[in-house]
Amino acid sequence: MYKADAAAMAAGISGTTLMENAGQAIFDAIVARWSPCPVLVLCGPGNNGGDGFVVARLLKAAGWAVELALLGEVSRLTGDAAVHAKGWQGPVSSFDPLLVDGKALIIDAVFGAGLSRPLEGRAAMVVRAVNRAVEEGAAEVVAVDVPSGISGDSGTELGDLSLKAKLTVTFFRPKIGHKLLPGRDAAGELVVADIGIPDDVLAGLKIACHLNSPSVWHGRFPRRTSGSHKYTAGHALVFGGSEMTGAARLAARAALRIGAGLVSVAAAPKALQIYALSSASVITLASESLQDAENLLRDPRKNAVLIGPGFGLGPELRDHVLTILRRQRATVLDADALGVFGPDPENLFKAIGSNVVLTPHDGEFGQLFPDIKGDRLTRARAAAERSGAIVVLKGSDSVIAAPDGAAIINANAPAHLATAGSGDVLAGLITGLLAQAMPPFEAAAAAVWLHGELGSRLGVGLISEDLPEAVPGALNSLFARF
């Protein structure tokens, strides 16, 4: 954003104009949601505070009861913030927790996206007072850019103290901290305002992280044509277990629904009847040994493989995974196929070539990458670079990362997706898209977004079996848009 601001100013838009536009956008968002009430505007010593001075001026001019407090001295403000501070015709109080009393609306213009250390001193005291008022239902918070205490770069809480906003108004584009937890929750409703920064400045910013949406990958999403047949849509092979059969059945159903031309489940003969009865559309193949698996993989038409869901931990799983990777098929490794390599992850990473997707949740991630720490985006990127695979770090704020550093943050997953088998469906969706020759990074992103969309469509009470059956409606809506 510093570079975007600088580019806008180089294009002839002054910093004072950008700040005035920012303040106007915040004011517009406030008056659209609240009626006049007592307001406390908390201003920091930088440009975020300058935005606060503009908001205070506009609210006061509109007849609102406004009190403004500054962290620091007006005489020490510089640049655009100093210019707009002069436009405020009213007293400037020092930060004091007592100012919060009786205020129904608190404008948090203290630090914004650039904060890199925990809140302390008077800022911390005031934030605690604001939080108490919010918890008691006496006040609501509007954050300017990013709620104070949250890192705009990562969404993490810096220390153990941050504000929880009802509304956050940011500028030009969302920040990573708005989309990763706990920053996403702390931001509340997010408004992204146009303050006059030209869109074409993005070209010079070398953006490597995107918010997941169809606009990112729809051009690579597979579609049938008049010449399509089942083999042009690929053949997904799912290796299933003998006891926990539900996982592979869910994955196979999802792969079918997402469009794979054929889907086969390979499992021990004693379990084949269960798989056969679960879906007439799924082919069942006997595979009781590593040699059986190798024989199945000799068919080049079986072009995408999923292994892990419900397979069961054991040395035979390691051997199966390594055999599949040697065949260099598009491969999804999920669940047990990740956990089995926890004691020796390097053995897995050495075998990974191209077209491999790993789908760990946080526990599995910790087993495979015990030394990789930090926020979710940092961890996913580091894991992808080390492993050579596309990594889907699963959660309410899943991150899809590629070895070259490209990353996509997903923010559409509802809480009710947290149900048994949901991850197996996701693995099947990815596999089905890989079978249709969608590139693995885009396939993973598309499947994760669609997974969230399905959860939102189905709503509270969904179970994993519902998810594949909702795919046609979601795809028809998607294809109607693009």
Image (spheres, rainbow, N blue to C red):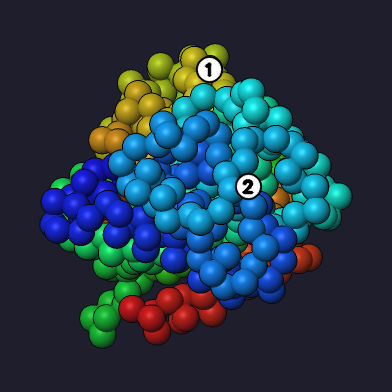
Closer to the camera, 89 or 249? 89
The total number of labels drawn is: 2
Residue 161 shows up from this direction: no
- Disc 1 crowd rating (10 Å Cα; few below 14, some 14-19, many 20+) is few
436 relative to 420, above or below: below
Residue 349 shows up from this direction: yes
What amino acid is found at the position of numbered circle 1 in the picture?
Answer: Pro
- Nearer-N-terminus badge (1/2): 2
What amino acid is found at the position of numbered circle 2 in the picture?
Answer: Ala
Q: Is 73 situated left or right of 326 in this image?
A: right
Distance between mark 1 and mark 2 Cα atoms? 28 Å
Q: Is 355 situated left or right of 47 in this image?
A: left
Q: Where is residue 254 drawn, in percent x and y?
A: 54, 62
25 relative to 383, above or below: below
Residue that numbered label 1 is attached to: 370
16 relative to 74, above or below: below
Asked which secondary structure carries label 2, the reply is helix
Q: Label for residue 186?
A: 2
The residue shown at (86%, 50%) is 136
The residue shown at (28%, 64%) is 196
Asked which secondary structure carries label 1, the reply is loop
The residue shown at (57%, 44%) is 92
